[in-house]
Image (cartoon, rainbow, N blue to C red):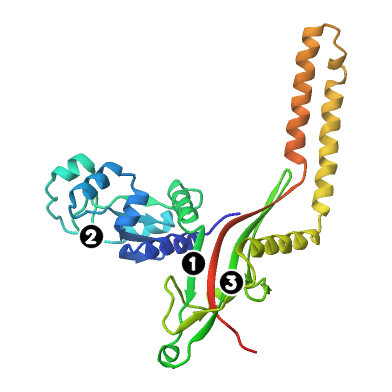
Amino acid sequence: MSLSPQEVQKQVLTYLETTECSIIEKSPYHVTVKLSPQADKQLTNRPYYWGFIERTGAEPETLSYTFVFAPDQYNEQVAKTPPPSAQPQPQDSILSRYFGVNPAGPRIGPGRIPREDVTYGSSRLQQIWAIARQEGSCVYLFEQPGPLQRETLFSAPYEPWLGVCFKVEMTCDVKKEALHFIGISLVTGQIDQQFAQRLEKLQLGPRLPENIHIQPGSLSLAGAANLLEKHMKDQLAGEDYSWAEAARERLRDELAVIDMYYEDLLKETEEEKLTAIREQYDNRRSEMTWQYEPKVNLSAITCGLFHLRSIRP
């Protein structure tokens, strides 16, 4: 599993926009951004600086970065761009000396804004994913109504849905992963396997809109989650598992090779040597079994409670 530079850029921009960072410059290959206080706290590891800001109430000066998603193309683009005119360097401040250099404003130029290559597998992308998992592991959102609903005399009913993103891992000596984002109505118990596509068409927000009322649910969150998990296990039961049998066949072949190798060694008559050889033999078999034995793991990685306009028949 891998992500293209465009997919990496889309995910990073989503994070930057969600945390209300200021985009200074953007191209298909990079983005230059002035971090918001929230993003600065999450990305820059400056606890002493932010502790000082919070204790004194001083105006924070957040860092700026150039995140590059396609380094080769970006380097070619920079090489074709004439260098900017020389500008005076900013004066050092006490804060910058003690808590890190902070650009006073969004200035672009050599040596002023640090560059980072953010590609699939990079530590910065892993950090943003970890933050997204922590901050967005569970969301609480409302469908935003059109202008006509705000003006009408009648309150519109909203139906609560539990949405869960499941990760399915099928592993042996190779590994396959798949994500399934499905939803269940807490009112009717209906399960929507295309729940992600449904949400993509809607505008969602964290606040309850005006002139809206929420329908009472007949399912608890725990009961709904159990039904979704059962639904996923039923789906997995119908999968083609020929890959698992092929993996077990490869395992039998590998264990046969190990048995053949240790067959004469295990005839050692000296007790101390035999104990060491048997321990090594058991370890090799355990390692090979762990590597080749087929396993299916189902886990929930994110979830959310979504209040959506009820669809009347």
Q: Earlier in the sequence, mark 1 or mark 3?
A: 1
> Label 2 sits on what residue type?
Pro
Q: Position of residue 303 (x, y in %)?
A: 56, 61
Q: Position of residue 194 (x, y in %)?
A: 64, 73
Query: Which numbered disc covers residue 303?
Result: none
* Left or right relative to 187: residue 120: left
Q: Which secondary structure lies at badge 1?
A: strand
| Mark 3 surroundings: few (<14), some (14-19) or many (≥20) residues within 10 A | many
Q: Which secondary structure lies at badge 2?
A: loop
Snapshot quadrant of residue 30: bottom left
Count of residue discs: 3
> Label 1 sits on what residue type?
Tyr
Q: Position of residue 87 (x, y in %)?
A: 14, 55
Relative depth, front residue between 49 and 304: 304
C-beta proximity under 8 Å, tags 3 and 2:
no
The N terminus lies in quadrant: bottom right
Name the residue at 42% across, 54% down. Answer: 71
Q: Earlier in the sequence, mark 1 or mark 2?
A: 2
Against 151, is 115 above or below?
above
Relative depth, front residue between 25 and 204: 204
The C terminus lies in quadrant: bottom right
> Label 3 sits on what residue type?
Trp
| Mark 2 surroundings: few (<14), some (14-19) or many (≥20) residues within 10 A | many
* Left or right relative to 21: residue 92: left
* Left or right relative to 233: residue 181: left
Q: Nearer the viewer, mark 3 or mark 2?
A: 3
Name the residue at 88% across, 13% down. Answer: 267
Query: Which numbered disc covers residue 106?
Result: 2
Query: Which numbered disc covers residue 140?
Result: 1
The residue wearing badge 3 is 161
The alpha-carbon separation of the residues under discs 1 and 3 comes to: 10 Å
Name the residue at 15% across, 55% down. Answer: 86
